[in-house]
Amino acid sequence: MIIIMLGAPGTGKGTVAGLLSEGLGIPTVSSGDIFRKAIQDRTELGIQVEGYLSRGELVPDDLTIKVIEDRLNKPDLANGVILDGYPRTTMQAEKLDKFLEGQGKKIEIAINLETPREELIERVVNRRICSNSECKTIYNLKLNPPKQAGLCDKCGSELTQRKDDNEEVMNNRLDTYFKQTQPIIEFYEKKGILHTEKVSLSINRMGTDVAKELIERLKK
Ligand code: ADP
Ligand code: ZN
């Protein structure tokens, strides 16, 4: 089963993807995680993409598409994948369709999370992530704090903050999202596979609630 996560930064795509992955037994591929790992490991790719991430801009399509297609070709994804953060442009969405078509596969559902902008900034600034690359559990200092300050509940590793999770870069990421990624929502709507969910404190509905319902629905 192929699932796509759409939504602005901070909506909880990563959290929902992680829960769906556990619940459905399908691996997650996060383009942002691939880029961050490359930067951390100082690989050729990391050097190429670092500037874009630090400014909150998208990595160019040709490079991103190649990186993701290489990853999608790996045997561990033969039974499905949850794509978190890809596609993010019309070009990427079209290329992904072609790529999957070539493998006789198609996207089951595109999950689109919507949250008010003020809430997104607040959430991202308070976000902390487990530094253990096998774990990567996401916390929020206000909404979902770890039991012991600075440490992951699940594995005890230190929590870190993403370099781009500050208000200035976040504003750029949001502008980039509304300009370049928002248009692909319509692309999936036209295909009849779009599933939009409002996620907000104001309606007391969070990513965890959405994930629970979707797991039941998609298991069938
Ligand atoms: P978020 O959705 O919270 O901004 P991600 O981890 O998905 O975070 O992405 C972090 C950064 O990685 C983006 O700001 C962008 O620079 C780069 N990136 C991730 N996915 C893509 C993509 N599909 N196309 C281009 N750039 C990407
Ligand atoms: Zn952990």
Image (cartoon, rainbow, N blue to C red):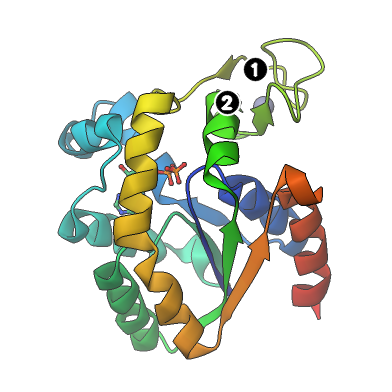
Q: Position of residue 28 (x, y in %)?
A: 55, 55
Q: Position of residue 98 (x, y in %)?
A: 31, 83
Determine whether label 1 and label 2 are within 8 Å by CB.
yes
On screen, residue 51 above or below 209: above
- For the residue pair 122 and 72, the one nearer the viewer reads as 122
Q: From the Cβ of disc 2, is ligand 2 less than 8 Å away?
A: yes
For label 2, the residue is 132
Q: Amino acid at mark 2?
A: Asn
Task: Name the image quarter holding the N terminus.
Answer: bottom right
On screen, residue 196 above or below 161: below
- For the residue pair 49 and 189, the one nearer the viewer reads as 189
Q: Residue at x 45, y 27 (%)?
A: 165
On screen, residue 159 above or below 111: above
Quarter of the view holding residue 109: bottom right
Quadrant location of ligand 2? Answer: top right
Q: Residue at x 29, y 71 (%)?
A: 90
Pick whichever of labels 1 and 2 is earlier in the sequence: 2
Q: In screen coordinates, is 214 left or right of 76? A: right
Q: Which mark is residue 137?
A: none
Q: Position of residue 122 (x, y in %)?
A: 58, 30
Q: Position of residue 190 (x, y in %)?
A: 46, 88
On screen, residue 201 above or below 145: below
Q: Amino acid at mark 1?
A: Ser
For label 1, the residue is 157
- For the residue pair 1 and 200, the one nearer the viewer reads as 200
